Amino acid sequence: MPQKIIIDTDPGIDDAMAIHMAFADPRLEVVGLTTVFGNVTGKQATRNALCLAEMAHYPAAVAGGAETPMTREPQPPADFVHGPEGFGTLPAMRPTRMADTRNAARYLVETCAEAPGEIIICAVGPLTNLAAALALDEALTRTAARVVVMGGSAARHGNVTACAEANIWNDPHAADAVFAADWDVTMVGLDVTEKTQCIPADFEAIAAQSPVIGSFLNEATGFYFDFHEAKTGTRSCFMHDPSAIMAITDPELFGFENTPISVVCEGEEIGRTVTGAEGRRPVRVAMDVDSDVARRAFVELTGRADAVAGARRTEDGN
Ligand code: BDR
Ligand code: CA
C-alpha cells in the first residue's frame, strides 16, 4: 500500500518540484494539498496547487489555508525567489477544479481523523496551518502518523537572515507550536536541503522525458536558477522541498540526529531554530544526505511524471 501523505505547501518553484515528484512516485498516495502564504499569497498558493494537481491529473483534494502568520507581522511574498505568480516568469494559470470547502486546518484535522495513524503530514511552507489545526483539535497529534517539516537549520545558519530559514521565519510562533507538540516530528532543514543541488541540465533531461510536466518545471526553474546564481555564483539550485518528500520515501539517504527544537519568536534572531530545548519531545533532525543519489532519484522520478499522469488519465477517463 502506498504511504498516504498530505503536503502543506506554498507553491512556489521547489514546492512544484516536490509535488510533481510525489505525484509521480508509486510509493506515495498524495491525499491532499493544503496551502499557505509564503512564497506567494495564500490565494495564489491555492490556485497554484489546484493547477499542479490538474496538470498531473491527480485527484488530490486542495484546501486553502492561512493568508497571514499567527502573531508576527506578515512579510511580503518571496517573489524575488519564485516570481510574481510563484512559477518563475510563467504567467498565472487558471485552474478549472475547485478547492475543498473546508479550510486547511479543518481539512487536516478531519482527514487525519478519518484514517488514524495512516497519513504523514509533510509541511513545506510556513507552519501556520499545522499550528491552527493543533489549536482546532490537539487529537491531531495522535491521528496524524507523523510530521515531516522542511524548515529551519540545526547549524546556526539561515537563508532569509543569517540564522533563520524562510518557512520558520515567516511564522516562528506557529513553528514553535509544532515543535512543542507531542507528536513525531522530523525536521529537514538547510543542513541537508542546501547539500542537494540540481543544475539546468537536470531539468532539461526531465523536460526531454516528460514534455508537459518536465517542460513546465524546466521553464519555471530558470528564474530559480537566476536567484541562486546571483547568491552563490553557481548556476545550481537547492532542493529544499523535494528533500522533505525524500526523507519519507528514502530515509536511508539521510543521517538523523535527535534533539528537541524551539524557535526564537522575537528580536534579531527571530525565526532561528534552536536545538536542545528542555522539556520537549526530541525531533528527528536530518543532518546528512547522500546528495548524489537524492539528485538522481529526483531526476528519475520527475522524468516519469508525464507517463504516470497519462496512465492515471487513461484509468480515470478524464
Ligand atoms: C523554503 O522556503 C521556500 O522559499 C521554499 O519553497 C522552501 O519551502 C526554503 O527555505
Ligand atoms: Ca515551500
Image (cartoon, rainbow, N blue to C red):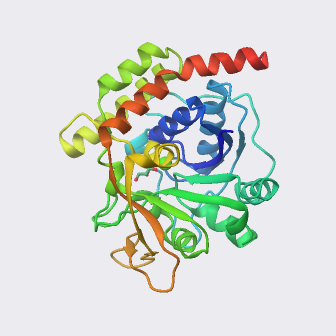
Residue 51 or 282: which is nearer the viewer?
282
Please say if 273 is above or below 35.
below
The image quarter containing residue 182 is bottom right
Looking at the rendered image, the quarter that the N terminus falls into is top right
Residue at 62% in and 57% down: 67
Residue 42 or 143: which is nearer the viewer?
143
How many discs mark residues in the rendered view? Answer: 0
The image quarter containing residue 68 is bottom right
The image quarter containing residue 294 is top left
Please say if 43 is above or below 258.
above
Q: For this view, does 32 lie left or right of residue 37?
A: right
User: Residue most toward the left?
Assistant: 233
Residue at 46% in and 22% down: 303
Q: Position of residue 271 (x, y in %)?
A: 41, 69
Residue at 52% in and 33% down: 21
Looking at the rendered image, the quarter that the C terminus falls into is top right
Please say if 247 is above or below 268.
above
User: Residue most toward the bottom?
Assistant: 279
Residue at 57% in and 73% down: 177
Q: Position of residue 310 (x, y in %)?
A: 64, 16
Q: Position of residue 287 (x, y in %)?
A: 34, 59
Q: For this view, does 197 lie left or right of residue 249?
A: left
Residue 43 seen in this snapshot: yes
Residue 54 or 145: which is nearer the viewer?
145
Residue 36 seen in this snapshot: no
